[in-house]
Structure formats: C-alpha cells, structure tokens
Image (spheres, coloured by chain):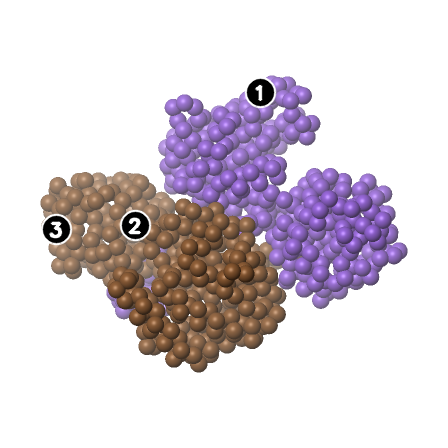
Chain colours: A purple, B brown
C-alpha cells in the first residue's frame, strides 16, 4: 500500500494493524515462507533494483552530501547479501508465542506469559535503501505491521523494494495482503505521521542524530533509538597502559562516525607524565586530533574542547583529567548520553564499582566501546541501539519488536472475593 | 523533599535521580534495611498518622464523592497491614542486578544482561493515602527515585507518610538522603510535571479513568496504566452454560467498578432461546441491568446500549450476538480496550484460536476476567495494569520499575573491523 490522495497515513496504520493481526494468526511456517519468497524475489529482480537505484543515485549527485550519497548506493553484491540476511532471519527461532513463564494460579488454572507482536511500527530512515527489506523482514518475522517513511533521495529504490515485498506477502498469504506494509512517499508527511500515537505503537528512526532528535521532540509515540552517542573511556590509576592505548585507539579510529565510538577519554591524574604522554602520542599517531577538557587543556597543552558534552563523530576526541573513580562516574552521569562507557583497570574492585554504578545502557571493563553493537552482542539482526530506559535498552534485536500477552487456561474458575479458588502460585516448567 | 518556592519540580526530579544512583550503589541489605525501618516507623507513628488522616477526612466531608471519601479513610488495622506489606516487599528476592543472560562473545570477553532501576518515576494518585508507602517501598526496593503527586484531599496524611519515609531513608542511608522521594504538594503543578520528559522516565497514574486519560493526552513521558477496562466475555456455541453463567455473574458482580469487570458479553447466536434466556435471567437475578447491542437489543427486548464501546463501571453490562468466533474476535478488536477477554467454550480448537488471535494484554479460557490482577497473577505487589504495548503489558509487578543494562568484562579486547577477536557467541550458564 502506498499513501496517495485516497488513503491517509492514518488509514494505512489502521489497515496495517488489521493485516498484522492476520499475520500473527498464521502458523509460523507461513511467516517463514513469506520471508523466503521475499529473498527469492529480491534476487530475481536484482537487475531492476540496481537500475532504479542508479536513477536515484544519478538524481542525487551534487544535491546531497558525499556521505549520504555513499549510503544511497547499492553496491554490486548487496542484493545477494540482503537475500542471505533475510533467509537467516527466516531460520531464527520463532519469536512469536514464545513461552516466558508458566504459573499454576490455582488447581486447574494455568497462567502463561508469551511473546507477542507489538502491533504497528513506523520506521523513518534516510538514504540506505538496503534498510527497507531488512527492517520489513524483521517486522514480518515478529508479526508486526509497518509504516515505512524513506528519504526522498531513495524514492525509486524504495518504491520497487516495497512493491516486491508486499507482492511476496500477498502471494504467500493473501489473507494478510499488501496492507501489512505501508510506504509513505510524500515528503512533508513526517509531522502528520508523528501525530498518530493512537494507531502507531513505536517509531524507529534510522538516520542522523538530527533526525532522531527531531522525532523525539515531536511525538508522543515511543521512540526506539538514540540521538547522541557520547561514549566515555575511563583510564583508571591501575590501568594496564598497553590495554588502555589499544582500546582507546580502537574505540576512536575503528569507525569514528559510529555512535559507539569514544568521544571522551577520562584519565586518572596520577597518570600525568610519561604514561599519559605515551597514550596521547599513540592517539595522535593514529590520526586523532585531541582536545582538552577544563583541566587537561592546560596540563597537556591541548586546544580546549567545544563543550563538556560534545559528539565529534570524527577523528577527534576530548581528554580530561579526574582525581578519582567517583569523579569519573559523576562526570559520565553529568555529561554522557547513557550509551556505552568502559573502564580500563587491573583493579578488580574499581572495575566492579564502575560496572555496578555507571547508569548507561552498556558498561564495559577492559574492552572497546565499539563492541556495543547488535551483531557483536550476538543478537542476529539489529533493530537499533536504545538509550531510552523504557521497553528496550542498548543494542536491540528482534525482541525489541515484541511485547507480551498473558494467557490463562481454566476450567470454569471464578474469583468471588478471592474465596472461590485456593491460590497456589506454583511455577511450572516451561515445556 | 517537598516542593516549595525554592525548589521546582524539575530540581526535585534531578535530585531524585542523583539520590537513586546512590541508592542503586548500596548493597542489597541496605535497601532492605530502609524498608524495614519504614515499616517500623509507620507502626510507631500509627496514632499520629490516623490523627492526620482524620483531619483530612473531616475536611473532605461533603466536598468529595462518597466513593472518594471511602478511599481516603485509613481503616483501623490499615497501618499494620501496610507495614506487613512493606516487610514482605523487603523479603522479596533482590530485583536489582539480577542476571538475565550471559554470553561469551569471544574468548575472555563475557556479556551479561542485568536488571537495573529505571531512574525517576512520577506517581500521580488520588485519595488512597495507603498507596503512598506501598509505591514508595516498591520504588526503593527496585532502586528508583520518585516524585509523588497526591490529591489535595489527602494532603495531611500524605505529608506525614512522606516525612516518615524520607526520615527512614536518611537515617539508614545518609548518602542517599531525603531527596530520593519528592512530594509535590501544589495543586496545579500537574501540567508542569507532565512537561518534564527529559528528567522523568515513567509516569504511573493511580486513580480514575479521567485522570489516566488526561495524563496520557498531555505528556511525552511514557505512561504505565490504562484509561479504559472494556473487558469482553465470549460465550461460544460450544460453551458449558453452567460455567458461562457462573463466570459472567462473577466477572460483573464480584466488583462492578473494577477495570477487570466484564462490560460486554458476546453470545453465539445459536444459543438464542432457552440457553441465552437462562444466562440473562441469572445475571438479572444477580442484580445486573442488561443492555443490548445492535442485534441483541431487538432479539432479547433489552434497552439499547449507550455505544458499542462503553465502560459502565457499575452493575450494568451489554449483551450482543455474534455469528462466529471470527466475528467475536473482530468485535473485540474493534470495540475493546485491549485489557482482558475470556472465551467460554468446551471446544479446544475455538479456545486455542481465541487465545492465539485476540490482541489483548490478558486472554483467558473458561475463567473470570476478574483474575486479571497482580495479586492473583502471583506478582506480589501490583504497580498497575498496563494496556500499553511498550515496556510492560497487563498486571505489572516490581519488574515494571526495572530496565536492563549490558555489562561486558574483557581482558583488553578491541574490534579492529571485527578482525581482532573471533566471535564465539556461546551462551553461558547463569550461575
């Protein structure tokens, strides 16, 4: 379904929910069959997809940033990779209806808690046409309906990918139909979409910090994602400086624009001198431009950092001195974004304190912040990384597209002021 | 802390977060000790609490509804019950830092997912001064900070209860201090509070549908709760009419104003005649006033129901006829509130379909909707019942006050384009 004159985004959301309920009612094998059909269809239409993408890329030349252009291009082997990824999602354990707990409430009265689709998701993404089939496949696997809002620059790529996917759904499951996934094409509809909190359950933005931040500020729909990734590494007094150096360099240089790249390195002030000098030199040798926090700028002769809370997203980082673990933790709480922080130390007590007390989605000991990622966390596909404290936090896989339902099976039980049954509340095995 | 001229609600929220981090950093035994101190203090100050409550009740006479007045009164044995309830919460398994999963990411690199406090909760409640110590105890047990906004009618009761609780916190844990729980006293501050989405993580309203609905409409903070409880019972063609009758009567009569009371009884039209007549008579004999949906009003000579989606919260219910299980499920999806629905049938296939397909927080077979409750579900204390699809759904216990953090322990690992370690992604045992 594509939004046009005759169908508003609200209608699309309502129809997507009805279709998602039909999808949820299907046996697992049918949802798997839809995904395999999508994978086959993408490969069968590879030439057409590449042709549409080439037209998008051609039209965007000179009008968008080089970075955006890079993310718009589908590389030669991309369709095969996408199809393989979708087949891998199809092979994953069935996420819907998974039994989480089972309790005997009273004799003959059993309560199950099971996983269940959330309902209708809105995905807003920029460039990256390859994100469309990935996210659609995750939504289908988990029984959800979708509204997709892509960037104008990928219009033709998205339109064809969307068509192939809903065609596959309708062929394999006519009772679900094409309404399961709506494509919103008009450009200025984003504010309209963000008002639909009564018919959309979750928004997942995939794009720049500005996009995510705008969405968070302008909707009452829960948002899964993060605007900032201001990650810290704290190099403790008892750090192994070899580990500290390797980890700081990796955390910045491996992919400087990633949200899990380190932006600020806090260093215990007992390391000032040879130890800190060699860390600074290693970072500079790796191409990193260092800035100084209030204390470090003077002590190390570095240019002053733009602010105490700054995401460079480039080969830049801030160094700051702290006098204690407590000060490091407070600094992170005051200036961080709650994404990922790491302590480098050989002092087990300091590591344990840091891991227990730092109030971020991911807290590491002697490991690079770059590990904060759905693939590296073994989640299979990544839906996003959340710095919210509600619903899902940190790298989120398919479980972020699920909620739960309680199912109770009885034999005629009533409550009657809690006198009609004798509550046993006995946990039962899950199989 | 009490909001006055010098301290805004925003300051209170920021201070509550700092205090909650100190609370979270304490050993479990200290959080338990705080709760036991609160319980002791409530009992030691029973006479004063009852006296303050009597003044509130006296002042409210004739100014509030009889129902509200009933909920304002602390009954003679209530303080002892409250203290016992708090000691029971203290005895529960430690909710913070519970290990949910453990994964070997690579050799020497282990990823844990653990439970963690959400942060700062805002509880808005009407009357019911007994709700204050209950919810404060749950928050403390789970390491959260709190802002409390009580009704004007309970001002003196709430002020004393709040004072006793923060006194106990400060005595047992001076490093946490009184700022952990803020009491907002000014009446018209509610709209101010609802704007604090950057410093408050979750709102939990305890009160009327109007209150919950108002809050949902006026804030971007996630809301845990439900405005409507429009529960359905579907009496299938293959129902045991004895069970159907007992369950329908219980679901309405046991507590007609409860959110889990049945509001609409859908009856398969093959039961029209003696079977339905005897169900109708049993309900009427139990004091229920029946209204008819579009089809049933004519067929059964009942007054027409106010609407297809109506919560009576009284000894009234709507009866409607449907021709199939499909029609019953569609009716529930179109007119329900996603709270609790029950099917009465001896047809296992129909029961399975209903449980698999009905998209509500709680879906029952041959059991009264009144079982939809935290106590009956064995959750210990109940934070609320959620019809949202994000974070927590259905009756919510202390787990609704928790989120998760990922903790990773390494030995110096880096990512280096995913070539520095060999990913094993091997699940490890949880102990």
Label 2 SS: loop
The picture places residue A373, in percent across and down from the top left corner, at 64, 46
Residue under numbered circle 2: B230
Dot 2 or dot 3, earlier in sequence? 2
The residue drawn where x is 38% and y is 40% is: A21
* Left or right: B218 in relation to A51: left
The residue drawn where x is 38% and y is 49% is: B214
The picture places residue B182, in percent across and down from the top left corner, at 50, 63
User: Are labels 1 and 2 on one chain?
Assistant: no
Q: How far is the residue under mark 2 from the one under mark 3?
A: 24 Å
Q: Chain of mark 2?
A: B
Q: Is residue B66 visible?
A: yes
Q: Chain of mark 3?
A: B
Q: Quadrant of the C terminus of chain A?
A: bottom left
* Left or right: A290 in relation to A48: right
Residue under numbered circle 3: B277
* Left or right: A397 in relation to A256: left
Depth-wise, is mark 2 or mark 3 nearer the camera? 2
The picture places residue A188, in percent across and down from the top left corner, at 50, 28
Residue under numbered circle 1: A52
* Left or right: B267 in relation to A90: left
């Amino acid at each position: 379904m594509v939004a046009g004159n005759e169908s508003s985004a609200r209608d699309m959301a309502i129809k997507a929910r009805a279709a998602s309920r039909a999808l949820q009612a299907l046996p697992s094998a049918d949802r798997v069959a839809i995904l395999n059909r999508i994978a086959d269809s993408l490969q069968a239409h590879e030439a057409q997809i590449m042709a549409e993408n080439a037209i998008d890329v051609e039209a965007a030349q000179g009008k968008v940033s080089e970075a955006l252009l890079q993310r718009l291009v589908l590389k030669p082997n991309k369709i095969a990779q996408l199809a393989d990824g979708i087949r891998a999602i199809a092979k994953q354990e069935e996420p819907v209806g998974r039994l989480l707990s089972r309790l005997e409430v009273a004799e003959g009265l059993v309560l199950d808690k099971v996983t269940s689709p959330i309902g209708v998701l809105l995905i807003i993404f920029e460039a990256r046409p390859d994100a469309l089939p990935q996210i659609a496949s995750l939504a289908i696997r988990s029984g959800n309906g979708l509204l997709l809002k892509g960037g104008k620059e990928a219009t033709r790529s998205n339109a064809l990918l969307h068509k192939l996917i809903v065609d596959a759904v309708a062929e394999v499951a006519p009772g679900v139909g094409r309404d399961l996934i709506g494509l919103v094409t008009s450009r200025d509809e984003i504010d309209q979409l963000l008002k639909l909190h009564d018919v959309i359950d979750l928004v997942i933005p995939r794009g720049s910090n500005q996009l995510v931040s705008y969405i968070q500020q302008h909707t009452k729909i829960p948002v899964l994602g993060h605007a900032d990734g201001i990650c810290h590494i704290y190099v403790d007094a008892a750090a192994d400086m070899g580990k500290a150096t390797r980890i700081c360099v990796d955390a910045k240089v491996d992919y400087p624009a990633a949200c899990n790249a380190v932006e600020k390195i806090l260093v215990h002030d007992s390391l000032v001198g040879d130890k800190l000098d060699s860390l600074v030199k290693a970072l500079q040798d790796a191409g990193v431009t260092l800035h100084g926090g209030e204390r470090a700028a003077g002590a190390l002769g570095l240019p002053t950092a733009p602010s105490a809370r700054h995401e460079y997203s480039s080969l830049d980082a801030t160094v700051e001195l702290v006098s204690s673990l407590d000060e490091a933790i407070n600094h992170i709480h005051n200036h961080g974004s709650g994404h990922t922080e790491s302590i480098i130390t050989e002092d087990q007590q300091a590591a344990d304190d840091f891991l227990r007390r730092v109030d971020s989605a991911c807290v590491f000991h002697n490991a690079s912040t770059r590990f904060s990622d759905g693939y590296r966390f073994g989640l299979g596909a990544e839906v996003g990384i959340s710095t919210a404290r509600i619903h899902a936090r940190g790298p989120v896989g398919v479980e972020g597209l699920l909620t739960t339902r309680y199912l109770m099976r009885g034999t005629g039980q009533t409550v009657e002021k809690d006198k009609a049954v004798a509550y046993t509340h006995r946990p039962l095995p899950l199989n």
